[in-house]
Image (cartoon, rainbow, N blue to C red):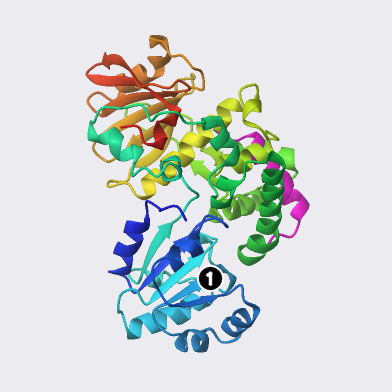
Amino acid sequence: MLPRHIAADVRAYLAHFPSLLITGARQVGKSTLAMDLGIEHYVTLDDIASYQSAKADPKGFVAHLPRPVVIDEVQRVPEIFVALKEQIDRDRTPGRFVLTGSSSLQGFRNLSDSLAGRIGIIDLYAFNLSEIYLRPYNFIDHLFSGRAFVASGPVGLAGHLIKGGFPELQVIDHAKTRQLWFGSYIRTYIERDLHDVGNIRNLDSFMRLYLALALRCACLLNKAELGRACQIDNKTLDHYLSILKNTYQIALLKPWHGNALKRLVKMPKLFMLDTGILCHLLKITQADELPSSPYKGAVYETFVLTELVKANGYAARPVELSFYRTTDGKEIDFVLDDGRQMVSIEVKAALTVTPADFKHSRHFIEQNPGRVRQGILLYGGEIPLPFGEHQGTPLWALPLAIFAGGG
């Protein structure tokens, strides 16, 4: 397995918490990461005998486990958390239980808030670009450090967007095989995860929504329009969106709100959380198809969102992620706020940049005097380019491939 940047945080959590929960989408490497911790004992609730035992008697099942132990696929028996709480309250020795699950903590049914202080939570995502290139790099830390930007070297970015970040896909170069893998992944997700964490009564309507979200990726989430298009009522739509979010299939990016301006949009932006799945659903199967696709901009913006989410998970100082859009069309794709300063990021798939491309960055800087550390425009070229300053804030055009570890 390629080294995971978040592994250091995992070991730090194990040294302080009696239990650790590693959550993430199916097939992102949760089990592999957990088993790489050197813990001898392992049990998976995918095993039918273990599942039936845990379901019938969660207290007895947990009480008879050796310690420390890895318990895989815990979302299948959410009742196990009550039993874990009792065991942890009797013995708070750090590192006793390592849990993995394909749903976020909010997605587990019957889970009490009383686990607060007893469990560390790690969100694991598919590989980011710097992990694939074996570079110890965090783009968010770099942005706020003030260090210079350096080109990352040749990166076949379109090919990475088609593959996405799932570990198994990194060694599959054949387009047909990739399509078979993604098709199997989606079927498994629907058949397994939706059964475990959601009450889906109409799989056809759910699949309509899943495909509709891909077509609207990187756009404002208009629930009324989406519900009409998918023939789903508001309550069902909210339920489906909650499941998709809790199982790491989508992310909803909130709008940025400042005190000075009131004419800002209030809808969140919708993103898929893997460009490989997105391209599969959009029927973009080869890297050379991406430049001419009408969805090219959405795919590149989704790539940036996923890289920011992943980097934020192991950043030295995590940031609040949002976007900025006014009702008259001024837009910043991503705003990163560390509580003291902000960085604005715009995304442009084109190979060239002009000073006019920074007009929205300049507007945002003017509306937030002294708060914006850098104005960044990510573009399809290969080298970092300085574009001067605006009111003391440096402006940079950076290659999209800089996520691989430039500088």
Residue 322 located left or right of residue 407: right
Nearest the eye: 104 or 186: 186
Q: Position of residue 360 (x, y in %)?
A: 40, 18
Residue at 55% across, 46% down: 170
Q: What element carries label 1?
A: helix
Left or right of 20? Residue 351 is right
* Residue 107 vertical placement versus 70 (above, below): above
Tell me if residue 218 comes above or below residue 242 in the rendering.
above
Q: Name the residue under label 1.
A: 74
Expressed as whole percent of the image width and height from the top left, the position of residue 47 reads 62, 76
Identify the image quadrant of residue 162.
Answer: top right
Viewer-side residue, 399 vs 333: 399
Which portion, as a residue range, is magenta? 198-218
Residue 292: in sight, yes or no? Answer: yes
Q: Where in the figure is residue 166, as x and y percent of width and height? A: 55, 49
Residue 171, horizontal then vertical, whole percent: 57, 47
From the image, which quarter does the C terminus lie in?
top left
Please report the residue visible at 41 percent of the width from the left and 41 percent of the height from the top: 130
Compared to residue 176, the image places residue 7 above or below, namely below
